[in-house]
Amino acid sequence: MPSPRPYVSPLRERAAARTRALILRRATELFAERGYARVTVADIASSAGVASKTVFASVGSKGDILDRIVEQGEADSDYERSLAELLTLHTPQSVLRQLARGTRSGNEGRFTVHEAIHKALPVHDNGEALWERYTAAYRDALLTAARHLHALTPSPSYTVEQTAGLLWFWFSPSGWRTLVVENGFTWDDAEDLLYRTAVATLC
């Protein structure tokens, strides 16, 4: 006779999911504010209002938490919708305007996540690989945008790969961070500057 399946309470599952989400949100905020190296599991637990053992049981170690933040950032990206809209545009200026607007929206909306990951890179054992994993889809989207620009008139006077590199230079998380965080630009001013720079260079 088969043994009965263990009962799983839907209420308990939902409560556990809310706890995980809260832990990840508080960890993201702390990593972004203080830096990954200066935050302990105990700090995360205190901020989330739970015990340290709950953090370990729900999400795992501090490294596991960072991995989950990266996964969540990837899942929450809205680049596919923005890219699909971009591919319907027929002038270089409108494509670059959409790139400026779309990447601004993504970077501003996920600013805390980007900061949490950015500040972890120098002290993370696999920081470079972590960043490449987090930005792989972003780079692919900009390469697709570069190919679209080269199908329009006038097309850029660079190779597709060089154009994609320039788009990454301007519109990557690092590009936005350089202007907004390191140099005090507003998001509006940064969007306008990056758009005008891209148009002047590529058109």
Image (cartoon, rainbow, N blue to C red):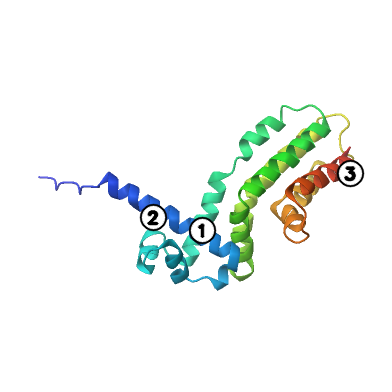
Q: Closer to the camera, 15 or 59? A: 15
- Residue 58, horizontal then vertical, whole percent: 38, 59
Residue at image location 78% in from the left, 60% down from the top: 183
Please tell me the numbered disc located at residue 36: none
Three-letter code, disc 3 = Thr
Mark 3–mark 2 distance (CA, rounded to whole Å):
48 Å
Tag 2 residue: 19
Q: Closer to the camera, 98 or 67? A: 98
Please tell me the numbered disc located at residue 67: 1
- Front label number (2 vs 1): 2
Three-letter code, disc 2 = Thr
Q: Is residue 182 above or below residue 153?
A: below
Q: Secondary structure at mark 3?
A: helix
For marks 3 and 2, the one nearer the N-term is 2
Residue at image location 69% in from the left, 40% down from the top: 102
- Residue 190, horizontal then vertical, whole percent: 78, 49
Mark 2–mark 1 distance (CA, rounded to whole Å):
17 Å
Q: Closer to the camera, 97 or 123? A: 97
Q: Secondary structure at mark 2?
A: helix
Q: Residues within 10 Å of mark 2 (few under 14, many from 20)?
A: some
Residue at image location 78% in from the left, 52% down from the top: 169
Residue at image location 39% in from the left, 65% down from the top: 56
Three-letter code, disc 1 = Asp
Determine the residue located farthest toward the left in the rendered image. 1
Q: Secondary structure at mark 1?
A: helix
Quick check: marks 1 and 3 in contact, CB under 8 Å? no
> Could you tell me which quadrant the N terminus lies in?
top left
Residue 160 can be seen in this image: yes
Please tell me the numbered disc located at residue 201: 3
